[in-house]
Amino acid sequence: MDTVQEKISALAESLAESHGVMVLDVEMTGSVTRPQVRVFIDREGGVTLDECAKFSRALSALFDVEDPIPTSYTLEVSSPGLDRPLKKLKHFEQSKGKLAKVVLKQKIDGEYVHLGRIMDIREGVITLKTPEGKEVLVPFDIISRARLEIEPK
């Protein structure tokens, strides 16, 4: 059986294409009796506050029909921001060419933290190109956390 979070993700995904966005992540926080649901959406070029509000209204209406959460809840729809976390392999694929900071569970080249441009993703291995021009191969399964870095214009 699907978890509540999986049901919410599936419902959000079902609306995403018609709104011209993609669902990047769904988080559930708060208590069992009053959960907070956060849905992060994006599209090429970013999303506006108005687009987040429209998606939130549509998702809330769908929740009213499908009732994935048995208690009252708070729904928040937003953009993940420029320095967004990279939690799934698909997030790295969507971020090719962008600068990322990756924290590892074990060292690669003597370091736990690597900063580099995401160049390629193959068979679960991410290729980062450091500012010095060195390529670092990072297996996805040893990443503790990662996020995009804000680059100066």
Image (cartoon, helix red, strand yellow):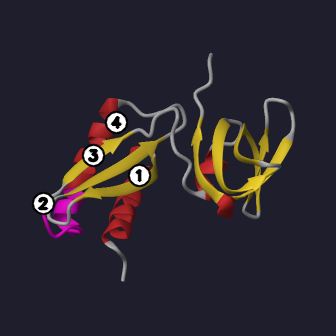
Q: Is the residue 134 above or below the residue 33 in the image?
A: above
As drawn, the label of residue 51 is: 4
The stretch of residues the image draws in magenta is 61-71
Left or right relative to 134: residue 140: left
Q: Position of residue 61 (x, y in %)?
A: 19, 55
142, 124: nearer the viewer? 142
Residue located 79% across and 36% down the image: 130
Q: Residues within 10 Å of mark 4 (few under 14, many from 20)?
A: some
**Residue for point 40% across, 46% down:** 40
Binning the other alpha carbons within 10 Å of mark 2 as few (below 14), some (14 to 19) or many (20 upward) gives: few
| Mark earlier in primary sequence (3, 1) | 1
> Which residue corresponds to mark 1?
16
Q: Nearer the viewer, residue 63 or 124?
A: 124
| Residue under numbered circle 3 | 76
Check contact, mark 4 vs mark 3: CB within 8 A: no
Q: Where in the figure is residue 13, as x and y percent of width and height?
A: 41, 58
The quadrant the C terminus occupies is top right
Q: Position of residue 29 (x, y in %)?
A: 29, 56
Mark 4: secondary structure: helix
Answer with mark 1 or mark 2, whichever residue precedes in sequence.
1
